[in-house]
Image (cartoon, helix red, strand yellow):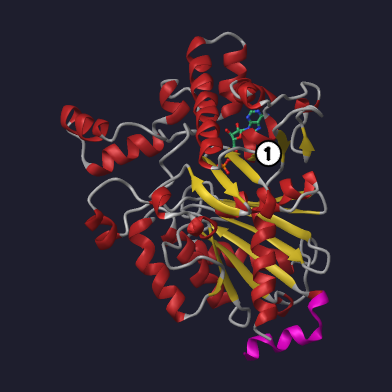
Amino acid sequence: MDQLGKLDGGVGTLKILVINSGSSSLKYQLFNMEDESVLCGGIVERISLKGSRLIHKVNSKKYVDETPVKDHKVALKMVLDTLLDAEKGVITSMEEINAVGHRVVHGGETFSGSVLIEEDVMKALEDNIELAPLHNPPNITGIVAAKELLPNAPQIGVFDTAFHQTLPEKAYLYAIPMKYYEKYKVRRYGFHGTSHFYVSRRAAKMLGKPVEKLRIITCHIGNGASITAVKNGKSVDTSMGFTPLEGLVMGTRCGDMDPAIVTFLQEKENLSTKEISDILNKKSGVYGLTNGFSSDMRDIEDTALKGDKVSKLALDMYDYRIAKYIGAYAAVMNGVDAIAFTAGVGENSPHTRKDVCSHLEFLGLKIDSEKNGVRGKESIISTEDSKVKVLVVPTNEELVIARDTKKIVESMK
Ligand code: ADP
């Protein structure tokens, strides 16, 4: 508990570093929790690869440092040195960082909320590696580096899966022999939980109603994409599953398909499990549909709207799958009060929002085409008389992580 001595100066000065440590990148933001402002932020890209660099943003200025970065510890050290730098920095001593909030992708069934990371939690994270072999190891590496470099700051884990731990059994189980759930915990976990949580709460605020009284469908559609049915504030179903591969058509991921395709292709093309997994995770989605043209929805939309048939089909499939899930989740909740769009495409693409909503007029949903022109700003884009409200809500996962970190740190006092 001596870690907390430093907070005695007053929670008003609480500074929280939020870290999102991926396989080859480390994103960060430093929050001043007095007013929840972001003091600075950035990313270390291409860790351990050629061309690694740190991009740091502070006071609307951008700094790039191209010193080679051999691993996550070196990356975090670079970040901390930058935070302390006389010109680019925002703090004068490492002791000013009161706590670190970590994004962790997979909490399995162990974590239904955020936690202080102590030895038992590290062990549970390691046990969950099997469930998220691509995501959890870099998350753990980031935590280990932060514990070493900031030994006095409490480290808090915030899980992508936690918000979905309220799913009922009928939504999270797969219809395969029950023993596989019992033996290996094969079930739907769902991801992007921090975003779905944040967006559902903001949407309720924007509508001036308590989230506990609303049925909201949150559409987190970016490169990775997922949809969640949020009933009375709780996640009751979500499109990503055992891994982030299920559900919507994504940048490079296939989303839903008949699982028999996996064994069929393995046999026909003589593919190993790693090869078929790479195809479905990294070579499919709109990237696969356009024969490798692009996984970026801006490129797909641009070329589709210029008349390219292949891109148009990929875009139509991307939008159609979203509409199909919204229809399903309206049934799951026996109705829907609001649909909220977020993430890269949801926040910025009037075309996709319009296309998706054109399938939903049967719900009494109407969007206002002028209001739908909005990009990256909180906005209600449905007409006054629309039975279902449609909103654009820029997500802010880092803020949720910072708030949870603050809450836990304060409760430790
Ligand atoms: P992730 O976090 O999963 O990498 P993002 O939420 O950052 O994804 O979303 C990235 C996606 O959003 C990209 O496919 C990008 O092209 C798309 N996007 C960003 N701006 C626009 C836009 N104006 N129109 C269409 N798509 C956009």
In the image, residue 306 lies at what x, y percent? 61, 10
Can residue 8 be found in the magenta stretch?
yes
What is the secondary structure assignment of the residue under circle 1? Answer: strand
Q: Residues within 10 Å of mark 1 (few under 14, many from 20)?
A: many
The image quadrant where one finds the C terminus is bottom right
Q: Amino acid at mark 1?
A: Ala
Query: Is residue 217 rendered to the left or right of residue 386?
Result: left
Quadrant of residue 77 within the rendered picture:
bottom right
The image quadrant where one finds the N terminus is bottom right
* Ligand 1, image quadrant it occupies: top right
Please say whether residue 134 is visible from this viewpoint: yes
Q: Magenta residues: mostly which secondary structure?
A: helix
In the image, residue 296 lies at what x, y percent? 55, 30
* Residue at screen point 48% across, 62% down: 139
Q: Is residue 67 above or below residue 407?
A: above
- Circle 1 sits on which residue? 338
In the image, residue 206 lies at what x, y percent? 79, 45
Toward the viewer: 402 or 298? 402
* Extent of the magenta region: 1-12
* Residue at screen point 57% across, 15% down: 304
Can residue 224 be found in the magenta stretch?
no
Query: Is residue 133 rendered to the left or right of residue 391?
Result: left
